[in-house]
Image (cartoon, coloured by chain):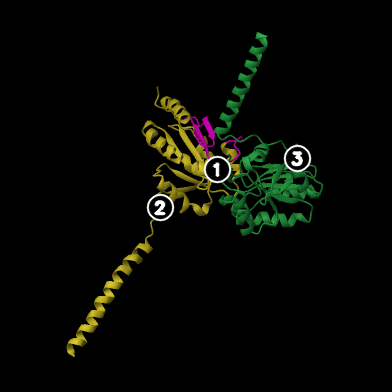
Amino acid sequence: MKTKTLSILLASLFVIAGAISVAGARAAGEVPAPPAIGATIEDFTLPDVDNKDHSLKSLLGKNGAVLIFIAVQCPVSNAYNERMEQLAQDYKAKGINVIGINSNVAEDAAAVKAHAAEHKFTFAILKDSGNKIADKLGAAVTPEAYFLDANGKLLYHGRIDNARNAAQIETSDLRNALDAALADKPVEKTEAKAFGCTIKRA
Amino acid sequence: MRFTKTIIPLTLCVLLVSFAAPAQKQKGRAAHPQKPAAVVTPINTDELKGLLSQQRQKPLLVNFWATYCDPCRDEFPDLVKIDQDYRSQSLEFVTVSLDDMTDIKTEVPKFLDSMKATMPAYLLNASDPEPAINTVDRAWRGDLPATYLYNEKGEVVYKHIGRVNVAELREAIDKVVKKGTGQ
């Protein structure tokens, strides 16, 4: 009996210690590691800016989807507004849906909705309260993109292109990945470091 | 009549001068708007590589930041304090901004001025930041802020991605600075 109590006590201590160390790691601002290229992203559900729930599965196009972590206030993310909208329009007909995700704790659904209206975004934007999906995908900055095929398999992760300033674009990494997949070719560059504003986590 | 003839132009002249003087003063102010005092130097990927890998007399602390990065702005006063405290103890400290080149004479020096930061300030001049990020550290994803401490041989002895832990950073500096002073 005593042994049982002791083991329960010890187990509880381990759980508490584990929780503390996890909390400590989060407090240090560490971003969880992203899934490996080729991994299948588990289905998840998030509300849009009108509080209507959408599952990842329901948003995948017949050739997949691009998830882009975006922000309302970040100047880097904002420098990509037109490019993101153009991307959404260019690939919708090709069966790839663009989905925006806002995980910033300080930007509520109303602010995200107003920002989307201001920039005439036609793609869906989901609000990731508590940055659960940002953590799941290891997203660190805005904008940061993830290209999934129709089965949710991760084919590309990283920046949209090389330059915040659209006049200096040399490599459109994300579009290259989409075009390769659409042509049934392997994606040559599967990762390119995303740059932008740090996602403000809860 | 003569009096009127003299006094009216005179009054007009006085009035004109009194209106023109402040206008000129304002114009003078407009011609010399408050120019930021901080000088920010562009640095390309090769130059950055050279800066980081060279052998040096002193340990080098490098902070990568941007004006659009809130945690960078938040930690900056701590970094300025570290610069002030360790400069006399043989620590070289430079900052590298990842802002856009168009901000090199405006937003970046303006912020540095507001922080009273006097350490050498660079701004990454690269249309593609990835090679520069990989030059610094292949494991670094490019998220900001990022702080690296190099010893005299150019080896990384401390790094931190995200807002620095001041006590931890000071401890790391203390170790290399002591070595640097030839103890």
Instruction: Kindly report the secondary structure that dominates the magenta region of the rendered protein.
Output: loop
Q: Which residue is mark 2?
A: B36
> Is residue B150 a member of the stretch shown in magenta?
yes
Chain assigned green: A
Q: Which residue is mark 3?
A: A43
Part of the protein shown in magenta? B137-164
Work out which quarter of the rendered image holds the C terminus of chain B and state it. top left
Q: On the image, which quarter does residue A82 sit in?
A: bottom right
- Which element is circle 2 on? loop
Marks 3 and 2: CB-CB under 8 Å? no
Q: Are marks 3 and 2 on the same chain?
A: no
Compare residues A193 and A171 and report the one nearer the observer. Answer: A193
Q: Which residue is mark 1?
A: B46
- Quote the CA–CA distance across marks 1 and 2: 27 Å
- Quote the CA–CA distance across marks 3 and 1: 43 Å
For the residue marked with disc 3, what is the amino acid?
Answer: Asp
From the image, state the color of chain B. Answer: yellow
Which chain hosts label 2?
B
* Between marks 1 and 2 in the image, the one whose residue lies nearer the viewer: 2
Return the mark for residue B155.
none
Q: On the image, which quarter does residue B21 sit in?
A: bottom left
